Amino acid sequence: MSDANVGPQNDLDVATRMNITASEAIRSLNGVQRERSQEQEIESNPNSDTLDLTYLKVLHNAKSLLARLPPETLAEIAQCHITDIRESAEDLDKICWLEAPRKKIPKILVISHVFSLWRNVILNTPACWSHIELLWPQTVINEFVARSKGKFLSVHASLYQGDIKMPRNFDLTPLIAFYSDFLTRNMYRVEELEIWINLRGTHVSGFWEDLKRLHAPVLKNFAFADLRPNANTEFLLENLFSSDTPRLSDVTLLAVSLSLIKPEAFQSLVSLELHLRPHTPITNLTRMLSNTPLLENLLVFGSDIESGPPPTLLQNPITRLSHCRIVELQRMQAGTINYIFSAVDFSEPNEIQILSEAHLADDGKLITVFSHLYPAVKKRIANADGLALSLRRRDVGISVIFPEPERRDPFILSFRERCDFNSTDDGRWDPQNRTLVLSAAVAVFDLKPQKLHIRGPFPHSPVTEEEWRTALSLGACAQKLSVDNVSHLALLIKVLDDPEIVCPALTELDLVSCENLQSLSTFQAMLSNRMSRGAEIQTVTIRERQI
């Protein structure tokens, strides 16, 4: 199918009716060509009187500091500008989603109007023209493709539901047909492909089926989002790109079904980001991971909506990801995350970040992410130098800090556990929940950190005496205690003044408080009592907290 016969019948007319700046985009492209012609005329007729002013401008621009930069630097500056414009967000509340990408074209091209030398560099740098937004006018797309000179392409396509800013009865069928035609003709050179769909209809399903049948021999990065609310059908990923994606290394999937994924297209994956649909069986995820042997980075977002109890923990993992270095699991129940760690052996990752939700099992037992702490994790954190606790209003955060010599290849461990279990129908929750989650961590962690940092939920929820005792027990061997963002430190002072001596090795105390602690008799008494008990705090730093 030729370019003249795809897309809307009169693309520029449609753009005009929608107040879209397609004509301005074309003028920008023509301006680059026109100015290049003027420059060629100067070169061929340097003595022409009519060209004196233009010639002087060229000479003036040639002496600018930018003109002294090497072409490679000028090309890199131009690419950074183009990337910034391309990735900038448009206010879709004010303009139609069809219009937003087209408004960026003049902003992208403006850098080619600065001076002729820079323009020539840009015109001869295919990378400046290799990103294609399929909502641009076809004339612009064709010009970008031509100027990319065979370089691998980065293609973005969007299909959204109509809104009040769109013309009535606007037919998206020709646009979808153009998408299919363009990708059919160019998929052999598409290196990055990003597709966002929030549109129902058989023509959309047809587009997806056409896309799946294409071969993608150079595709490295693929992002796909199914944003349709309450979709009755799902875009299925079996035989994705005819399972011919030998270079596919980075995949991002938003709200896509994992139930029928076949492994052939994912064998070379290095990075995988998944945003799961509500009620997605987590066993589908672990089955998929068993077919990604080269995976290095894994990021999984749950849906905050999980039905039924999590799967039973496995005695032995079903797969091993020996290359995986970064693992991030977000917005899932603790039991679900525990199952993932029981099913997948991540060998020795450098970074683990978890955001989970503690919950009660059917028998009333509290399930936290610490209920099944990965054995390799327990081994790695044994030499932790410090521990940072964050006691937010409804969640507990725990981060492990390692000594400076290990920072060259640091191990980052960060937990954040939501504590909304036992909430009442009116949204109230038991403040003791934080203590229960902290106690679960104490039961698992075998840490001897030299530094303990505690950040509180000021001013929402004061830290209780029981929470202070539990938190300090995690850093029982700490020599330095730092406390920030906590109101009403009287309970901390009381715990530190306990005759049984909490944190006996503590020699340095660093507090950020809105209270004048030095004037409190209880604070001075605590310091004196610890000295008499052989547990002197030698250095005390108190800084005022700005409210």
Image: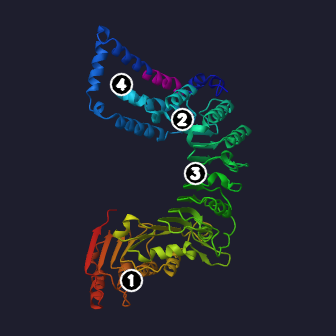
Residue in view at x 28 percent, y 25 percent: 62
Marks 3 and 1: in contact by CB < 8 Å? no
Per the image, the residue denoted by label 1 is 495
Q: Main secondary structure of the magenta part?
A: helix
Inspect the magenta stretch and tell me whether residue 21 lies in it.
Answer: yes
Q: Answer few, some or many: residues within 10 Å of disc 2's Cα (few below 14, many 20 plus, some between 14 and 19).
A: many
The type of residue carrying mark 3 is Val
Task: Give the residues in magenta.
Answer: 19-32
Between the residue at mark 3 and the residue at mark 4, the CA separation in whole angstroms equals 40 Å
Disc 3 is placed on an element classified as: strand
Per the image, the residue denoted by label 2 is 132
Q: Position of residue 364 (x, y in %)?
A: 64, 78
The type of residue carrying mark 1 is Val
Q: Hey, which quadrant is residue 406 in on the image?
A: bottom left
Per the image, the residue denoted by label 3 is 251
User: Which of the two discs, 4 and 1, labels the residue nearer the N terminus?
Assistant: 4
Instruction: Establish if 371 lies above or below 202.
Output: below
User: Which of the two discs, 3 and 4, labels the residue nearer the N terminus?
Assistant: 4
